[in-house]
Amino acid sequence: MMGRSYRRVVLCAGFIVAYAGLALPVQADGGACCLGTTCVKATAKVCKSEGGHYLGDGTVCGKDSCAAPPKGACCVGGVCKEESADGCAAKGGKYAGDGTLCKEVTCAEPPSGACCIGTDCIKVAPDHCAAKGGTYQGDATECTPSSCGAAPIGACCVKGVCAEESAAACAKKSGEYHGDGSHCDKVQCAPPPAGACCLGSECASLTGDACAAKGGKYFGDGTECAPSSCAAAPIGACCVKGVCAEESAAACAKKSGEYHGDGSHCDKVKCASPPTGACCVGNECLEKTADACAAKGGTYQGDGTHCDPGTCGPPVTGACCIATKCVKLTANVCAAEGGTYQGDGTKCHAGSCGAEPKGACCIAGACLHLTAKDCTAEGGEYAGDGTLCENVTCPHPPTGACCIGHDCVKLAADSCATEGGTYLGDGSKCHPTVCGEPAKGACCFGEEKCAELTEAACTAEGGAYHGDGTECHPMACAQVCGGIAGVPCDPGEFCQLEVGECCCDFQGVCVMPPEECPAHFEPVCGCDGLTYGNECMAHAAGVNIDHVNKCDSDLHGDVDHSGTVDVGDVVCVAGGFSDAMSCPDGDISPCGGNLNIDVGDVLSVLAAFAGDFDCP
């Protein structure tokens, strides 16, 4: 209680002196302490105990020492919010710098990976997975058909009851697992152990769980009921803090009471009154028991203590010299701080502790009231002992253009260095290209519109930036599909791959199949093994292309790919003679074709149909 009063005295004194321009510290190795926007000088310990923000040993209170901290963009989990650097750090965020704005900053998306919710798999961030009660498989993991496969189950015996579940679930219940694939109808679980259970004065043989369910007292597995198992314990008079009650010896001991023997009675026993002592409730002193004092919110001074003048009064203070600084403290606190106590009731005044004179000190255009030594240590210019800031004009440091990345701001050289910028010289000015042109890249607005912008401009416009140096092309903003994860397209679209990518897990883009195709004949072989009149016709059928030109055929003349050479092939070639698109594989004469369906192709099919011709 006395220590708490001391802290308030110290800070109140520091607060008054700070406003008078004398900023007296509590200890030689103390520093500036911000209480809200008010600056006082105190030790780190005292500053922290009063909820202040300590600026460091040797720091001094200046005009703007405790101004509200600057804010900037802070990225936490992919979300941007403008707050102070300390606030950002407390949330585990990434601070972009003082004065930065969220609209100028792109926060990196948090890592994601496969998340198993039961046997279902989704790809989300770790915290989202935890919020859904899932099991996170690790950053950058993908969902596969077997990612979240259900664990095998078997018969599990727990306290005589069988259930079919996984080995892990059985072990969690301390059960007996009978192996993967085992079934309860083939397993006989041992009955749970039983023991003596007291239900009042009655004893029954029950399991531990059954005894607890009935509110009984269980004596352990294998114990047996005896005539005296549940007999009631004898009782007697028990004195607790001057009050008597009749109960068992065990119950009395549990309350730290004085037991007067089995069969004793309260009407025959006199309990000693509980001790009392001085109790301080604020500055008022009352003689109470310790419990009564606590009930009033007071401070108990000990058994047998008495209320005397000054018992609960304010502590006696006096001037305390800590080095050359003077503060008002109690004798004990002064000694604890390493100071020299000047006596009860003494006061601090100029020269009490040989204090050094102070004067106006100019530091980077600002004026502080410091000693010459402190002013020099801060790199300032001292105006002389006794000078006042209101009578001194401090010159402001020169400023110039400061490049922080591609952004330009006007700062002093030291401020520019603090911000991690490049100073372009005193008097230099900011203009649009003074800090270089920012890099550009493809910026997608949905799947249709692409523009090459800077990352900041793309973010400001609500686009998705694809990286510095990327370019816009017809497929730059298309939806990605396929791949190892087998990402599907929207209904009505198909996953278009590069020519030749028929197998494996290649990644493509989602496109709508064309509704109309040109009539020119430039045959391609589809990934389905069929020949199409041109690339557009294959894509219209939702088929990717294996290679340019017709598909290879093992049977010469089988132009309709039925597996045999028959009348259908003759009809196909005859139709293709007038319309090549109706029979894309009809060009077979001479062997390999001549890029034209003509009379030679009709004759070649007829010969193959008759069995008189085949290509080598």
Image (spheres, helix red, strand yellow):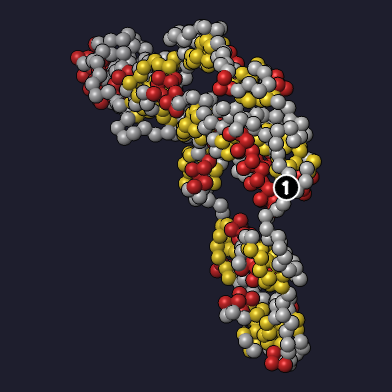
Residue identified by numbered label 1? 345
Q: Nearer the viewer, residue 172 or 488?
A: 172
Question: Which kind of residue does numbered mark 1 sit on?
Answer: Gly
Image quarter hosting the C terminus: top left
Q: Nearer the viewer, residue 259 or 566?
A: 259
Tally of marks? 1
Q: Is the residue 179 above or below the residue 97 in the image? A: below
Q: Is residue 399 left or right of residue 599?
A: right
**Which element type, helix, strand or loop, lies under badge 1?**
loop
Look at the image and tell me whether residue 28 can be seen. no
Q: Residue at x 74, y 32 (%)?
A: 351
Q: Quadrant of the N terminus?
A: bottom right
Tell me: residue 132, above or below residue 420. Answer: below
Asked if one can make out residue 367 in the rendered structure from this viewpoint, the answer is: yes
Q: Residue at x 61, y 18 (%)?
A: 362
Looking at the image, residue 518 sits to the left or right of residue 47; the answer is left
Q: Position of residue 543 (x, y in %)?
A: 35, 26
Q: Residue 561: where, in percent of width, then height? A: 33, 26
Q: In the rendered view, would you say 306 is above or below 538?
A: below
In the image, residue 601 above or below residue 230: above
Residue 152 x/y as whole percent: 56, 54
Q: Residue at x 73, y 42 (%)?
A: 319
- In the image, residue 354 lies at what x, y percent? 76, 31
Q: Quadrant of residue 23?
A: top right
Identify the residue at horizontal 65%, vertical 45% (top origin). 9
Q: Quadrant of residue 180?
A: bottom right
